[in-house]
Amino acid sequence: MKRLLERLLGRGEPALSAKSLPTVDVPTLVLREGATFPIVEWSALDAHAPVSDDPKVLDVFWTAVAAAWLDKLRQTLGGHYRVVESEHFLLLSALDARPAKVLMDFAEKTHRRILSLLDGITRNTENGKVCILVFRDNDTYYQYVSNYYPDEGEFAQSGGMFLQHGYGHFVFTEGDMFQMEPTIAHELTHCLMQHLPIPAWLNEGIAVNAERRVCVVGAPLETPEELHRMHLDFWNESTIQEFWSGKSWQRAGDSNKLSYDLATRFVQLASGDRDRFCAFANAADSVDGGASAAIANLGYPVAHLADAVLGEGEWSPKPEAWVDGIEHGQFNKVCLLTSI
């Protein structure tokens, strides 16, 4: 096991701290045809996983598989890309040793803080270490994430993304730590909530609020008064359905920006009673935008959150009017975006 990780991660990088781990034979990776980067068909590897109820055994297997995949990506990217490892993460980047260590230290600290801050909502649910991919430029970033989008459509720009596809991982573009830290906190929150079938607005609202608790985040370009006016001008009986269904996050321009801000406000309002909010987050379902869970656990309809921000109106979710696919639910469980 030690020799395997040394080969994949490079000598001199930290290896797994656990001792006497079983030897892992990494199966041949099955790659998606037609992809612009090595994209693994993860379901094809399930049959090779150890038959064991021991999470440590499964963690070792899937970490070794993930490391082998990142090594293929490293070879494709070339240049100075390398893979390094910490207790909970595997990082693929072209960062020098010092900034890579700073990033990993921040990821580990943020991992602990989010689990504490959102205790009862977030948890580690997947086997194997979390993969962080940091690309050197936007062109490479968008070329990579395009492999997870439909062939056609208009999509909002993003500064980072958690890809809940096969082996969940998150990706963003290299910058200074002031830029990268909020992205790590935001996407890691998504990662630690991937076991919940919650609607996009709740997922994003929780992630933005967690990001603001953990990091120093820059002020919005608009004043509160300007932003409130933008909300009143944009949201109506039709557009609010795109918010509840998740479609509004995929649109470019004001739709994406205002969706994040509205979701952030809704979570701030709903989380006043922590126990009730925790129960709501665990029960909320993207199928109805969290409507039934809100009545059962918060004690009021989700439309009341919209009333508080936008004034009285026809704000109730109407899932019967939503279209299956990318409009329905949490971005069709392909990815979760964050705009920066």
Image (cartoon, rainbow, N blue to C red):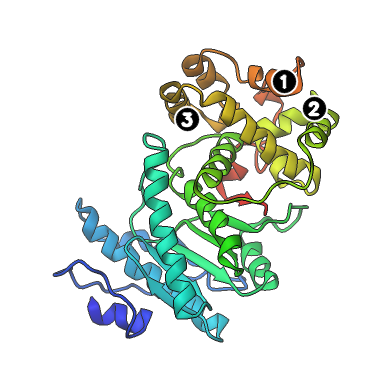
Q: Is residue 314 above or below residue 194?
A: above
Report the residue at 80% width, 48% height from top.
253
Report the residue at 48% width, 15% height from top.
296
Residue that mark 1 sits on: 315
Q: Position of residue 261 (x, y in %)?
A: 68, 38
For label 1, the SS is: loop
The numbered dot on residue 238 is 2
Q: In this view, does 106 lie above or below 3?
A: above
Q: How far apart are marks 1 and 2 (CA)?
A: 9 Å
Q: Where is residue 112 in the image (x, y as percent from the top left)?
A: 36, 50
For label 3, the SS is: helix
Residue that mark 3 sits on: 281
Q: Do the residues labelled 3 and 2 touch (CB within 8 Å)?
A: no
Question: Is 261 or 154 nearer to us in this picture?
Answer: 261
Report the residue at 33% width, 70% height from top.
64
For label 2, the SS is: loop
Q: Is residue 326 left or right of residue 313?
A: left
Quarter of the image containing the N terminus?
bottom left
Q: Is residue 322 above or below residue 163?
A: above
Q: Residues within 10 Å of mark 3 (few under 14, many from 20)?
A: many
Q: Which amino acid does label 2 sit on?
A: Ser
Q: How crowded is mark 1: few (under 14 residues within 10 Å), some or many (20 or more)?
A: many
Quarter of the figure with residue 130: bottom left
